[in-house]
Image (spheres, grey):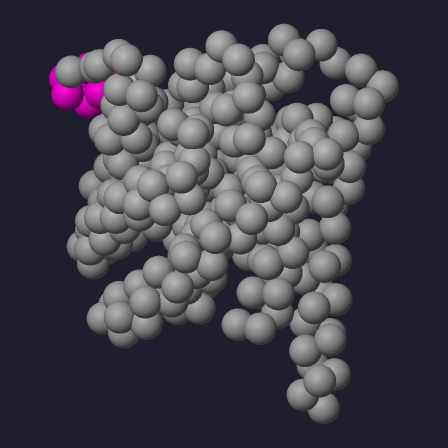
């Protein structure tokens, strides 16, 4: 009976994630037939980052009571990301890699383009705030530390003021902060009671609904694997994922489940975050004229995307 229930759960999750997989395949097919120009795909990314994803996140936090205990998660996630950057530097030395960017791919997570769509597909937009709460500390790390570290690898530097301004200028951060502000001040209910403001919410709902299909097509379009040189990036991805899963287990045991006693969706959001590929910002910020270093990172990201989907299916079924 238990095996039957597990099989049913697996099929149920597969059925929910199947549209995402098919959209990824569609995106890849469109890339093969060169349906879009690369500039069009870049415009899709801008649309997602600046409009559709912020709309989705704003609505998620608008309907959520932001608890003070969530601040613990923000701090813990920030520390975890810093720790993994240190681990990445250690792994680079241990593996004697000549790729100066290798240390960066052991930290950061692509929640925006991968994590959010997967989580929403299974648990719905009403639960999106759970993975977004886990992501806040990570976003802080990316803007304040990771970007600066990447620039140092490129021989450049940015002041703390510049990094802080870029953080608050981010549409995603603004959407989260405004959503929390409207929710905690009671303004969310007022918005529901007035026809004009309710129309704005309806507009944001329509815009936000474009997020998942657009992201999936973009990811599928850019999913490229170099099978001739797959062993090295595949090995690095396995090291990254196994290390992060151990860390996720410890954080879940002692913080999410132990100290805060949050529900299973929060726990799955944590594990999913740590299963995700490195932030897509890493190859964007790389100053690699030869292209060799960047190709390794891109291969790692592509492999990690595929393994994330498989691991998420198993994770949701088991937990």
- Residue drawn at (85%, 19%), measured in percent from left and top? 33
Which of 213/314 is in front? 314
Q: Position of residue 57 (x, y in %)?
A: 42, 37
Check the image and report above or below for 20 versus 296.
below
As for residue 163 lying within the magenta part, the answer is yes
In the image, residue 109 sits, relative to residue 197, either above or below, namely below
Residue in the picture at 20% in, 55% down: 72
Q: Can residue 197 be seen in this view?
A: no
Please give left or right for residue 55 compared with residue 167 in the image: right
Can you tell which quarter of the image residue 304 is in? top right
Quadrant in the picture for residue 295 = top right
Between 87 and 165, the residue placed more toward the observer is 87
**Segment colored magenta:** 160-166
Q: Which residue lies furthest to the bottom in this view?
A: 1
Identity of the residue drawn at 50% across and 24% down: 293
Q: Where is residue 119 in the image (x, y as percent from the top left)?
A: 54, 51
Q: Nearer the viewer, residue 61 or 84?
A: 84
Looking at the image, the residue that sits furthest to the right is 33
**Above or below 196: residue 108:** below
Magenta segment, prevailing SS (helix, strand or loop): helix
């Amino acid at each position: 009976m238990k095996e039957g229930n597990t099989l049913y759960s697996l099929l149920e999750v597969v059925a929910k994630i199947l549209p995402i997989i098919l959209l990824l395949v569609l995106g890849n097919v469109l890339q093969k037939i060169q349906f879009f120009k690369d500039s069009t795909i870049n415009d899709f990314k801008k649309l997602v980052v600046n409009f559709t994803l912020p709309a989705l996140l704003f609505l998620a936090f608008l309907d959520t009571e932001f608890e003070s205990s969530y601040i613990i998660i923000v701090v813990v996630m920030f520390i975890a990301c810093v720790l993994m950057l240190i681990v990445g530097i250690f792994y680079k030395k241990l593996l004697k890699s000549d790729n100066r960017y290798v240390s960066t791919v052991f930290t950061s997570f692509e929640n925006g383009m991968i994590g959010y769509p997967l989580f929403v597909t299974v648990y719905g937009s009403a639960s999106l705030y759970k993975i977004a709460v886990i992501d806040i500390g990570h976003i802080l790390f990316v803007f304040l530390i990771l970007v600066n570290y990447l620039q140092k690898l490129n021989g450049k530097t940015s002041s703390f003021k510049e990094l802080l301004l870029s953080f608050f200028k981010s549409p995603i951060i603004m959407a989260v902060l405004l959503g929390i502000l409207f929710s905690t001040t009671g303004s969310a209910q007022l918005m529901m009671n007035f026809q004009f403001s309710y129309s704005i919410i309806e507009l944001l709902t329509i815009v936000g609904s474009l997020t998942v299909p657009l992201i999936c097509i973009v990811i599928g379009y850019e999913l490229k694997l170099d099978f001739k040189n797959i062993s090295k990036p595949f090995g690095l991805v396995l090291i990254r994922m196994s290390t992060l899963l151990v860390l996720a287990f410890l954080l879940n045991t002692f913080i999410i489940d132990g100290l805060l006693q949050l529900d299973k969706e929060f726990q799955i959001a944590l594990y999913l975050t740590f299963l995700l590929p490195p932030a897509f910002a890493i190859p964007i910020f790389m100053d690699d004229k030869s292209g060799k270093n960047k190709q390794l990172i891109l291969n790692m990201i592509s492999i990690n995307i595929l393994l994330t989907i498989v691991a998420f299916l198993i994770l949701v079924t088991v937990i």
